[in-house]
Image (cartoon, rainbow, N blue to C red):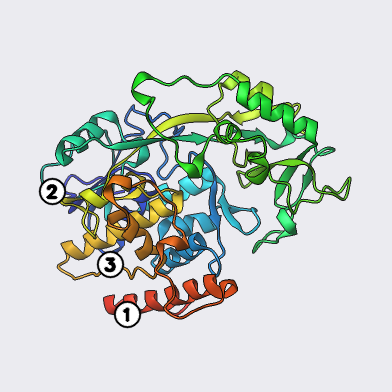
Amino acid sequence: MSNSNDFQHQIHIIGGGLAGSEAAWQLAQAGVKVRLSEMRGSGDMTPAHQTDGLAELVCSNSFRSDDADRNAVGLLHQEMRTLDSLIMAAADKAKVPAGSALAVDRDIFSDIVTKALSEHPNIRIVRERIDTLPHEGPTIIATGPLTAMSLAQSIGAATGEDALAFFDAIAPIVHRDSIDMDICWMASRWDKVGPEGDGKDYINCPMDKDQYLAFHRGLIEGEKTEFKEWEKDTPYFEGCMPIEVMAARGVDTLRFGPMKPVGLDNPRTGRWPYAVVQLRQDNKLGTLWNMVGFQTKLKHGAQVELFRTIPGLEKAEFARLGGLHRNTFINSPRLLDGQLRLRKAPHIRFAGQITGCEGYVESASVGLMAGRFAAAELQGRSLETPPVTTALGALLGHITGGAEASDFQPMNVNFGLFPPPEDKVHKKQRKEAYTSRARADLQGWLAGTGEVVAAE
């Protein structure tokens, strides 16, 4: 980290989460001097973070599927690796077994990102809270979904409208040695083996019908976190729905969602259970395990009481209980241009979840694009947006114009954001058609930038 008094930054990035960290890396690698302001470490903390590490993961440790041939987020992983993504490089170094998904040890991951940025000669990290939008000078706002109220109000004043908001929830983490493996067993769904796994990457807790119905009833009746008056009209995001909210939609909803038993043979019975609670490894040591899909707004006492009724978790010790926080995002289709600049103040770009993308990888990818766009502009280069047939371009298109501004909501990358293949393709080959086209078009885009790389 540059500490010299003569360090003159060319761009100011506000926020050291995944998007801000990735944007800083892309700019610094392009030779641009960056001031990276991060509130945590200055005496301030968000409702969800626990450390002052850059790119700290708070909701889950999973980057979801790493399958680049049949999954849109896996394709996004691949595109980001091609573009020298720090976030993906750190994830690959910090990964833990999770079947075909990419999950990481969150502490190692954050440490890798923090070290890389701290040691880069073109980056100066400053622990400070920024309360207002800068009136001049190139700036990237990457404060994420937990933007401090003062800055959120400044954004609202600059854009002439209130920021939108939704609720997000985090899942509990259990100490591995408190799980009863005489009841639980290790397996991935359908025994699917990941790149470095063995088909036994999840801990599975089985439930019979009576146990499940009692658990479902406990979710519905358990004491919940109360809303503040100003929060009552704030919606949930479908991709991170509290488990008790899902339970309220119907008695079998969870059995077709995070507690589905399909493809999980209990070795003690040779059959699928009525329902299953899965836990995914959360750190390299394998001492902490995340309850998959168990984001919750139950009060802590209610969580402990109810979750210890799950077979195998009767004596569970929790490293972290679930929680609820309010996320903020802007109406990007209305406010931003195609290169993430604020229309009313084009010296400011936005990146990450505050733009209305959802998910760790999506957040980082928007930071990657914001950093590259800003670097090109500062250096007098022309950089076209990625083709909409790529994962990067499809996500950017959604954020900056793919939805009606009045209906804009956070979204993960998915093939529904891509234009359909021009030629008729059988349904079974459709995903491969999307991904092969994306790879070819990304190579064409890179060739146009002068940044040709070998085909994946």
Q: Nearer the viewer, mark 2 or mark 1?
A: 2
| Relative height, residue 392 to residue 311 (above, below) | below
Residue that appears at 41% across and 36% down = 52
Q: Is residue 319 left or right of residue 229?
A: right
Residue receiving disc 2: 345
Residue receiving disc 3: 385
Q: Element under label 2?
A: strand
Whole-percent x, y for residue 337 in the image: 21, 56
Query: As rendered, which of 89 and 174 lies closer to the eye?
Result: 174
Q: Element under label 3?
A: loop
Q: What type is the residue that disc 3 sits on?
A: Thr
Q: Element under label 1?
A: helix
Q: CA distance from mark 1 to mark 3?
A: 13 Å
Q: CA distance from mark 2 to mark 1?
A: 31 Å
Q: Is residue 281 left or right of residue 54?
A: right
Looking at the image, tell me whether mark 1 or mark 3 is earlier in sequence order: 3
- In this orientation, does residue 447 appear? yes
Residue receiving disc 1: 447
Query: As rendered, which of 402 and 360 lies closer to the eye?
Result: 402
Q: CA distance from mark 3 to mark 2?
A: 20 Å
Q: What type is the residue that disc 2 sits on?
A: Ala
Whole-percent x, y for residue 33 in the image: 22, 55
> Would you call the spot at circle 2 few (<14 residues within 10 Å), some (14-19), or many (20 or more)?
some
Q: Are marks 2 and 1 in contact (CB under 8 Å)?
A: no
> Would you call the spot at circle 3 few (<14 residues within 10 Å), some (14-19), or many (20 or more)?
some
